[in-house]
Amino acid sequence: MILQAKQQILIALYLEGQKDRPHMEKITPQILGITAEQFNSSITDLLDAEWIKDVKIIDEDAGIPLFIDLAQVKATHQGIAAVENILEINNWWEPAKKVEKIKRQAAAFRLTALENFAAKVLADILKGQ
């Protein structure tokens, strides 16, 4: 499976959202192994598709965000459904089970950055954050 940058970002937001106290600002281009330009452009695409909301765009150049604040970002119902559909996750599963499945799938498809992020989220969930 090949995931576009915007799909990887959406999955990372979904992962962090599984925690009782998510810190969305932890999701950065560096964490996902993509460029800032790819990250910012993908955030715009996710907003336009209405898969995320509550993003604070600080500065833009020709319609491309230069700085984005994700502290309050949330995946919409459509965004959550997209992740669960792409990765075949049942919405009634416990958060740890969802994150573990994403971690395994990321490993299987050699998405190392996403696998590592999922492992950190899983560790936080298991230790109660």
Image (spheres, rainbow, N blue to C red):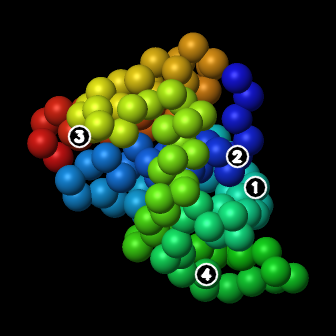
Is disc 2 surrounded by few (<14), some (14 to 19) or many (20+) residues within 10 Å?
Answer: many
Q: Going 49% across and 38% down the picture, which residue do you hit?
A: 84
Q: Which residue is mark 4?
A: 57
Residue 40 x/y as whole percent: 69, 65
Q: Is residue 18 above or below residue 36?
A: above
Disc 4 or 1, which lies upstream in sequence?
1
- Residue lying farthest to the left in this orientation: 128
Q: Is residue 72 above or below residue 21?
A: below
Disc 3 or 2, which lies upstream in sequence?
2
Residue 70 x/y as whole percent: 48, 69
* Badge 3 amino acid: Asp
Gap in Å between the C-alphas at discs 4 and 1?
15 Å
Disc 3 or 4, which lies upstream in sequence?
4
Q: Is residue 56 above or below residue 13?
A: below
* Badge 2 amino acid: Ala
Label 2 SS: helix
Gap in Å between the C-alphas at discs 1 and 2?
7 Å
Disc 1 or 2, which lies upstream in sequence?
2
Gap in Å between the C-alphas at discs 1 and 3?
27 Å
Gap in Å between the C-alphas at discs 4 and 2?
18 Å
- Disc number for residue 125: none
Residue 5 x/y as whole percent: 70, 46
| Quadrant into which the N terminus falls | top right
Q: Nearer the viewer, residue 26 or 41?
A: 41
Label 1 SS: helix
Assess whether mark 2 and mark 1 are in contact (beta carbons under 8 angstroms). Answer: yes
Q: Which residue is mark 1?
A: 38
- Disc number for residue 124: 3
- Disc number for residue 5: 2
